[in-house]
Amino acid sequence: MSPRLTVPLDFQRLGPDAMRSRAEELLEQVRTRRSVREFSSEPIPMEVVERCIELASTAPSGAHQQPWTFALVTDPALKRRIRAAAEEEERANYGGRMNDEWLDDLAPLGTDADKPFLEHAPCLIVLFRQAWGELPDGTRKQHYYTQESVGIAAGFLLASLHLCGLATLTHTPSPMGFLAEVLGRPENEKAFLLIPVGYPAEGCEVPALERKRLEQVLVRR
Ligand code: IYR
């Protein structure tokens, strides 16, 4: 067993008024996040994206194994290959793999099998879940709660990109097996989300959707 080492907790305690105004301010900022499907090709400051990936990588994880890899794709040829492979899967999805109820549920979003944003967005982040680890001798190391861990990291990533002024889409072309292949990732890495990042296209519109109110999502006991 490895020894348990500790360090003092770095924790900033705020007064109740500061806490309230921080919560209001954050909610106002986060409320405007939307899934964007029309991106401008304008370049973005990539160091901001890298900082947000670093931020996402501070997420808690099962046994602190940090079971994630963020593949940052800017190469136009790779983006083109990803678009072509995603559209091939989506043609099969929209052409029959998704049932009528599913297609009806998606109608308000206006999605279809065409995914031009995969080429237009200046970068794509492919978030991989490491289903198991690889020890230096090549043997497998078990990982724990990888879905939960990577899901939390994804939330950190989407929120931080938005707060830094960048638009994102949470995209899940399915199945996503082609991503590990195109990006040359090892067998233990399973694509979890494909996130185009950039500025919205000029005049971008998004579906008129309403969010559930607090009273619909909160139960107090
Ligand atoms: N993956 C498809 C379909 C799709 C499914 C759900 I659930 C969405 O919320 C949105 C789209 C696509 O990307 O078009």
Image: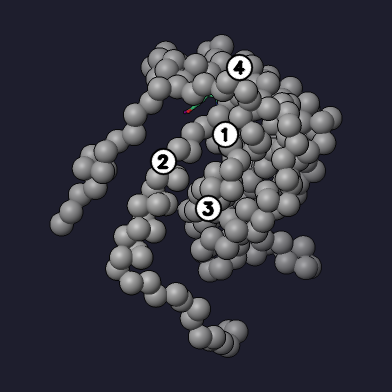
Q: Name the disc covering residue 31, or none.
A: 2
The quadrant in which the C terminus is found is: bottom left
User: In the figure, 99 relative to 119: above or below?
Assistant: above
- Which is closer to the viewer, label 2 or label 4? 2
Q: Is residue 81 shown left or right of residue 191? A: right
Relative vertical location of residue 87 with respect to residue 44 in this rendering, above or below: above
Q: Are marks 3 and 4 in contact (CB under 8 Å)?
A: no
Whole-Å distance between the Cαs marked 2 and 3?
15 Å
- As helix, strand or loop, the secondary structure at mark 3 comes to helix
Q: Which residue corresponds to mark 3? A: 156
**Of marks 2 and 3, the one in the foreground:** 2
Q: Residue at x 71, y 61 (%)?
A: 134
Mark-to-mark CA distance, 2 and 1: 15 Å
Give the mark, 1 or 3, whose residue is nearer the N terminus.
3
* Position in image of residue 150 (x %, y %): 55, 52
The residue tagged 1 is 169
**Distance from label 1 to label 3 (Cα)?**
14 Å
Nearest-to-viewer mark from 1 and 4: 1
